[in-house]
Amino acid sequence: MRYQVPLVLVAVTAAVMLGSALSGPAVSGPAEPGTPSATRVTAAVPVTSPTQALEAQPGLPNFKAIIKRNQASVVNISTTQKADEGEGMHGLPEGMPPGMPPGMPPGMPPGMEELFRQFRGMPGPHSRPGPREGNSLGSGFIISADGEILTNAHVVDGADEIIVKLADNSEKTAKVIGLDKASDVALLKIDAKGLPVVQVGDSSQLEVGDWVLAIGSPFGLEHTATQGIVSALGRSLPDGNYVPFIQTDVAVNPGNSGGPLFNTRGEVVGINSQIYSRSGGYMGLSFAIPINTAVSVARQLAATGSVQRGWLGVGIQTLNGDLAKSFGLDKPAGALVGQVDKTGPASKAGLKPGDVILEFNGTPISQSADLPPLVGETRPGTEVALTVWRDRKSREIRLTVAQLKPAEDEVVAANDTGEQKPGILNVQVAALTAEQREQTGIERGGVLVVGVSAGPAARAGVNAGDIILQVGDQLVSSPQELASLAGKLPKGQPIPLLIQRNEGRLFLPLTITG
């Protein structure tokens, strides 16, 4: 159930609290005739209005000049597109919230993926039989006087028509120069000259606590300005592994998508892209694409219409305390390699599951989410040095970064069948069938978990449907081998257990107690 407070009451209460907090002791005037007398309190300092008190506070920014200078550079973007019967505006079944990611990024806390919503703007009418036209709404900003505009890729992806509304209320049809879904950046072009442009800043200079300002069209309310601070830097989100997002507490909502985030110098430092929300609206957690990332993407889009990214060919996960201990690390740091693509540069350089990448070309990796942006920004063909933790000691591995390409399905081989009853792990497993190997991409070894009861495997996080691939540094080739390996495990010592879940691989800390 939602509880709503009248806006007038909120505004009045806020004003009273703000006035009492900033203006010192309250001063009451003479009581009106027929009302109870009021106690007079004499102020020790001159009384100022809340506005005057705010302006007198050092360090509090005044955004008026920034808003006046940049409002005309921020545009409203609306799109239309055809949707098939039974689908929502963005190709999703009716009722499914837009922007729901299919999986988790490295380091994302459990459950957060269900709360993310991309700003998809103002949806059109819901289901009607037969094809229909959908509408979406977003924001953007002008980066060149001849009509280049930056916005989010999800604002214009799949649109049949894109209309840009300028500050003078004129409307222009835009064409897409290029869009990059991985970074959620799109570059548009309208036919115009002499347009006001924003000043692009340097997002690498941002610090947590810096004041920032957003201008956009939340719910279609054009040129709405909201402010806040930078809450965190380098955040990894479910569908943005190649973007080190800027987290802010700026109030942004559907329709702010693609709008600019300014610093106190009036420079654009980010593109507002996503929110964390249970309701689909503002909850104090907003995320922006760093402008340095966006500009790099835009340059490539302008030059070639596409973006080149570096690729190592590894699947990674975050280390927790038990996993770090199981690999002999003093603290949970680095990116744990759970999967190595046999065709990628990591495989050619000798990386293997269980390695922990501690540094990428001299840059420390404190958590796994730090690695993808660094790799993605590396030009393909560049030789880099990795500091890797293996066999309880560090070593350097050099490799040449390749170009990221779309994933391709692999055809794999078959293996034997069989079934094993619960043992010391209290987990029931079966050998993989040929069909299961073809579906999962596992060429050899591995056992399918068909049942889990309370015990070591359940405590480690093993679920029915997982495929156990490795115990410690030993590959599991059959249910019988899993039972044999489990019987030899030391008690009280976490051991890394490698599993495959859906299409990803991850390590779990397995501990045999008592």
Image (cartoon, grey):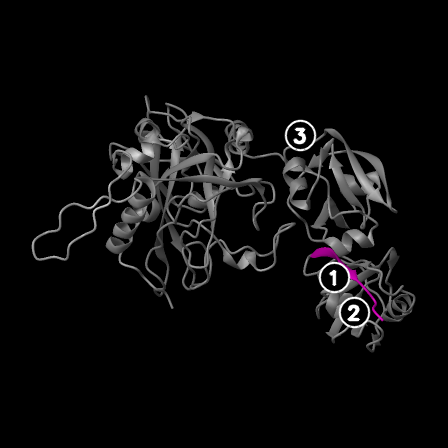
Residue at 78% of width from left, 73% of height from top? 427
Measured in 3D between alpha carbons, the distance from the residue under mark 1 to the one under mark 3, in whole angstroms, is: 34 Å
Measured in 3D between alpha carbons, the distance from the residue under mark 1 to the one under mark 2, in whole angstroms, is: 29 Å
Which label sits on residue 456?
2
Number of numbered discs overlaid on the protein picture: 3
Locate residue 293: give its quadrant.
Answer: top right
* Foreground tag (3 vs 2): 2
Magenta-tinted stretch: 504-514
Is 456 in the magenta? no
Which label sits on residue 188?
none
Quarter of the figure that contains the N terminus:
bottom left
Residue at 13% of width from left, 47% of height from top? 30
Element under label 2?
helix
Q: Are marks 1 and 3 in contact (CB under 8 Å)?
A: no
Circle 3 residue: 379
* Foreground tag (1 vs 2): 2
Q: Nearer the viewer, residue 511 or 71?
A: 511
| Residue 176 seen by the camera | no
Q: Nearer the viewer, residue 67 or 451?
A: 67
Is 508 in the magenta? yes
Q: Earlier in the sequence, mark 1 or mark 2?
A: 1
Q: Would residue 181 appear left or right of 459 to someone viewing this image?
A: left
Q: Nearer the viewer, residue 414 or 359?
A: 359
* Foreground tag (1 vs 3): 3
Report x, y in % for residue 203. Answer: 52, 31
